[in-house]
Image: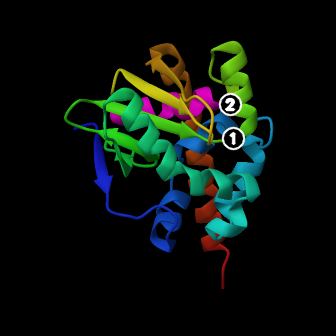
Amino acid sequence: MAFDVIDHDQGTGKWLAWRHDGIGASEAAAVLGENPWKSANSLFKEKCAPPRSFAAAGNAAMARGTALEPHARARYAEASGHDLQPACLQSTARPWQRASLDGIDRANQRLVEIKCGEKVYEHTATTGTVPRYYIGQLQHILAVTGFAAIDFWVWLPKRRGLLLTILRDEPYIARMARLEAEFWARVTDARQISCASRP
């Protein structure tokens, strides 16, 4: 198996500590320099500091997305015929590589990443593509699971759901794994220096 299932409920203190001690899927774009809102250096500083609470780390848009996610997952099940459940996974080959999934069906190797934002809906509806800043998240999940594809489901109340299936991109994953490994080595070194300097 390419991954271990971690028994943490997303949003809890245990989950936050576990997520802090690795690179999550939503952090991949920052490491790769593809996140317009957060740089790799900013993420590095976060990883070297104590973990923040989930509420402190989020914003109103994230809170709304979290509230809508169960409804979006139900609509995805209706549209796709697949009932996927959230899970936390950790790569066995690269234990620092982690993913908090919106939905997975291990038996059928099916995954879904759910988005419930206005901007992502507008982009996906207009272009028929995934916004560039989410590519890293999707490919990171595929790297952790070893699966061949992931569904990208965009949903808002009273609107038509948008479903794209994104295939595994091996060259992208190879570059991402290299950059993430380098990033995590820097974090590990910085944490060790910090601990060694304490009285």
- Label 2 environment density (alpha carbons within 10 Å; few <14, some 14–19, many ≥20): many
Q: Most extreme residue toward the front, as rendered?
A: 158
Query: Main structural element of the magenta stretch: helix, strand or loop?
Result: helix
Identify which amino acid the numbered label 1 is placed on: Gly
Q: Most extreme residue toward the right, as rendered?
A: 37
Label 1, label 2: how far apart the Cα atoms are? 6 Å
In this rendering, does residue 177 appear at all?
no
- Label 1 environment density (alpha carbons within 10 Å; few <14, some 14–19, many ≥20): some
Q: Secondary structure at mark 1?
A: loop
Whether residue 39 sits left or right of residue 109 in the image: it is right
Q: Magenta region: which residues?
A: 134-146
The tag on residue 151 is none
Q: Are marks 1 and 2 in contact (CB under 8 Å)?
A: yes
Residue 167 coordinates in the image, percent (x, y): 44, 16
Residue 148 sits above or below residue 146 on the image: above
Residue 184 coordinates in the image, percent (x, y): 56, 46
Figure quadrant of the C terminus: bottom right
The tag on residue 121 is 2
- Residue at 63% across / 50% down in the picture? 65
Locate residue 50: give its quadrant: bottom right
Is 72 magenta? The answer is no
* Along the viewing direction, whichever of 22 and 83 lies nearer the viewer: 83
Locate residue 134: give its quadrant: top right
Identify which amino acid the numbered label 2 is placed on: Tyr
Residue 188 sits above or below residue 118 on the image: below
* Along the viewing direction, whichever of 41 and 196 lies nearer the viewer: 41
Residue 71 coordinates in the image, percent (x, y): 49, 49
- Residue at 62% across / 48% down in the picture? 186
The tag on residue 117 is 1
Whether residue 100 sits left or right of residue 6 in the image: it is right
- Residue at 57% across / 51% down in the picture? 68
